[in-house]
């Protein structure tokens, strides 16, 4: 009896060792397969992130190592008039563009969700502008909004309205940019369409039985159940708006004209880093932008409990 028990114990020990060895080999293989991604994350993200924190306290440039100056870069930023102008331009764009993109995006998605013949073609048409590179998009809209021979002012002249100097006016330059950006919201429309497709048809049928009209169904069924998707697009839209760069930089050749009305925060950061080689100053700007975006995202997340509704809750 004792020999049988002893033999069973030896077998269990052998099995446990094999399992441990197999588990160790599996973990090793997993780390080996993930190592390219981990190395890339450390080299191209984690290290530059940590280095930028240090550089923000120095006078580092690409050509010279610089020296430690403490909070001097941050103090100079708050005395920089163009810094405040770029923040104003960026906030102006964000406050107007993000809500408008949500309103138009939801409206377009609801229209494209209708069951009519040829809807796939219409969806493709509205999505196509997102495939156009931003540089080509800027060139196209510079022609459309040209005050002399642009198509927009030409159409306004046909109905007796004198069009403004869109991109040459300090007042109309940012609304023009918002108009261009709204032209490319096809990607968010696709996300809204996916959210609309996830709403159960039974809820609409129940609303019809209760005598609800189109607006009542939209207000009490569609919009509440679409709020998780709206929440996602709100966060991503706000982050993207604060990083606006390609369109204004291309249209103004990096000058931000007229009167710096199109000088956005990331443009000013880019100029300091790669035009004036003030990497320490630009790193300080980058971390201020990080704090602003994180604070805005945190506010959106905290307030989401009041207006975001998930199915089953």
Image: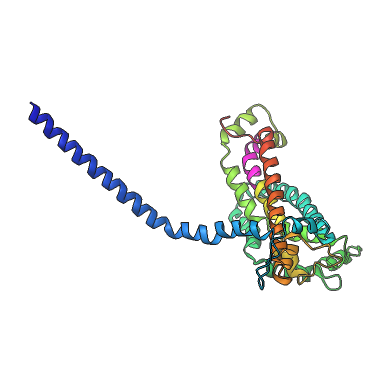
Magenta span: predominant SS is helix
Residue 253 spot, x, y in % from top left: 76, 72
Residue in front for this viewpoint, 247 or 263: 263
On whether residue 115 falls in the magenta region, the answer is no
Task: Report the quarter where the C terminus lies.
Answer: top right
**Number of marks in the rendered image:** 0
- Residue 298 image-quadrant placement: top right
Residue segment shown in magenta: 220-233
Task: Report the quarter where the N terminus lies.
Answer: top left
Residue 182 spot, x, y in % from top left: 73, 56
As drawn, 194 above or below 151: above
- Residue 70 image-quadrant placement: bottom right
On whether residue 230 falls in the magenta region, the answer is yes
Residue 231 in view (yes/no): yes
| Residue at image location 80% in from the left, 69% down from the top | 151
Residue in front for this viewpoint, 12 or 129: 12
Say left or right for 112 vs 176: left
Say left or right for 3 vs 48: left
Residue 179 in view (yes/no): no
Q: Looking at the image, what colour scheme do you see? A: rainbow
Residue 183 spot, x, y in % from top left: 71, 59
Residue 272 spot, x, y in % from top left: 73, 66
């Amino acid at each position: 009896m004792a020999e049988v028990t002893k033999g069973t114990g030896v077998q269990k020990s052998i099995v446990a060792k094999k399992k441990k060895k197999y588990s160790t080999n599996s973990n090793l293989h997993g780390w080996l397969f993930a190592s390219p991604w981990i190395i890339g994350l450390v080299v191209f993200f984690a290290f530059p992130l940590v280095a930028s924190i240090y550089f923000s306290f120095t006078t580092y440039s690409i050509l010279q190592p610089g020296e430690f100056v403490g909070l001097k870069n941050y103090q100079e930023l708050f005395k920089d008039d163009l810094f405040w102008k770029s923040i104003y331009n960026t906030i102006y764009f964000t406050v107007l563009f993000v809500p408008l993109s949500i309103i138009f995006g939801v409206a377009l998605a609801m229209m494209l969700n209708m069951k009519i013949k040829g809807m796939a073609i219409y969806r493709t048409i509205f999505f196509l502008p997102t495939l156009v590179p931003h540089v080509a998009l800027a060139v196209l809209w510079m022609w459309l909004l040209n005050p002399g021979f642009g198509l927009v002012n030409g159409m306004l002249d046909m109905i007796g309205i004198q069009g403004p100097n869109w991109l040459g006016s300090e007042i109309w330059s940012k609304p023009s940019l918002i108009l261009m950006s709204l032209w490319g919201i096809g990607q968010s429309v696709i996300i809204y369409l996916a959210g609309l497709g996830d709403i159960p048809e039974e809820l609409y049928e129940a609303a019809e039985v209760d005598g609800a009209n189109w607006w009542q169904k939209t207000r009490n069924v569609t919009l509440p159940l679409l709020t998780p998707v709206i929440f996602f697009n709100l966060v991503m839209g706000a982050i993207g708006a604060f990083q606006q760069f390609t369109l204004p930089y291309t249209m103004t050749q990096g000058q931000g004209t007229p009167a710096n009305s199109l000088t956005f925060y990331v443009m000013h950061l880019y100029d300091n880093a790669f035009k004036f080689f003030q990497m320490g100053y630009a790193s300080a700007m980058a971390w201020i932008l990080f704090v602003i975006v994180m604070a805005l995202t945190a506010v959106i997340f905290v307030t989401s409990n009041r207006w975001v509704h998930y199915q089953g809750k």
